[in-house]
Image (tube, helix red, strand yellow):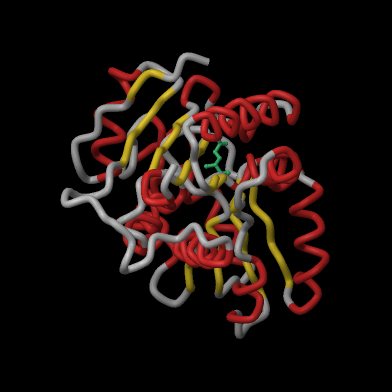
Amino acid sequence: MKVEERAIGVFDSGVGGLSVLAHIHALLPDERLIYVADSAFMPYGCKSDELVEERCMSIAAFFVEQSCKAIVVACNTATAVAVDRIRQKYDVPVIGMEPAVKPAVSHSLAGVVGVLATSATVASDKFKQLGLRHGADARLIVQACPGLVEQIEQGDLDGDQTRMLLHSYLDPLIEKGVDTLVLGCTHYPFVSHMIREIVGEDITVIDTGDAIARELRRQLLMSELLLLANDEKQDKPASIVFWSSGDVDKAEPLMSRLWGKATVPKQLLF
Ligand code: DGL
């Protein structure tokens, strides 16, 4: 199969990874993309490692069956639990994500960095190691945010309940003097307008989507899998195919709203 016919597979527990997909599509507009929202098993953040790993391996197998040339784990929780196993099993570039602690620590003038993430990410060994590696130069204040992913999955991006939840997680961080805040879950950029409203203009908010898109580009280039200017391209825009393991009729309006264009997700049958 020609390189231009092979897609990049991107997945998350639900709609959160669409925030990463948007960065990938903006940077690599000619690349074909397949997005899987594992909505039937969302949220990953409060599931057992075994279940999350099993889901990730099934989705990775699906991407490989579809001849994907790279896999992006657009989920901090899934990366913490399963990225090593996916890399061991499949011989395609596998790009994972982790909370942007390193750039946040170098950016922080006050030396106080807040990290918002799911409970599973916070509890993972990978995250603990990240803290040990980069946390020595700043005070890291880690805040698990149970319930926030569910609010976003319900489409509550600006309601009172989401605002109250955000206040309960952000107010203590503001009181402790954080000047840099890491969004350690791919769902959270969808409420970044509310986060900004609560924390004000003086706190820098860091999202990792753009860095992941650039890392994907770098790895595709290194592996000679990147579409180059002289490669054969389709006349029409590159396709993006959406899948969901949940109820696709329910998924459609939210995915369309977050993607900013009508999307009709296909039904994932596993
Ligand atoms: N969006 C995912 C992340 O980045 C996790 C959401 C979930 O708990 O399912 O961690």
At 49% across and 57% down in the image, what residue appears? 225
Answer left or right for 19 relative to 111.
left
Q: Which of 28 and 75 is in front in this view?
A: 28
Q: Which of 200 and 245 is in front in this view?
A: 245
Q: In which quarter of the image is residue 56?
A: top right
At 32% across and 61% down in the image, what residue appears? 26
Q: Can residue 18 be seen in this view?
A: yes
Rendered location of residue 150, percent (x, y): 47, 32
Rendered location of residue 201, percent (x, y): 39, 74
At 33% across and 35% down in the image, what residue appears? 241
Picture layout, residue 57 above or below residue 182: above
Q: In the picture, which quadrant includes the N terminus? A: top left
Q: In which quarter of the image is ligand 1?
A: top right
Answer left or right for 244 relative to 237.
right
Q: How many numbered discs?
A: 0
Answer left or right for 19 relative to 117.
left
Picture layout, residue 51 above or below residue 150: above
Q: Is residue 208 visible?
A: no
Q: Quadrant of residue 87?
A: top right
Q: Which of 98 and 31 is in front in this view?
A: 31
At 59% across and 66% down in the image, what residue appears? 175
Picture layout, residue 62 above or below residue 179: above
Q: Which of 100 and 218 is in front in this view?
A: 218
Rendered location of residue 122, percent (x, y): 71, 47
Rendered location of residue 70, percent (x, y): 53, 48
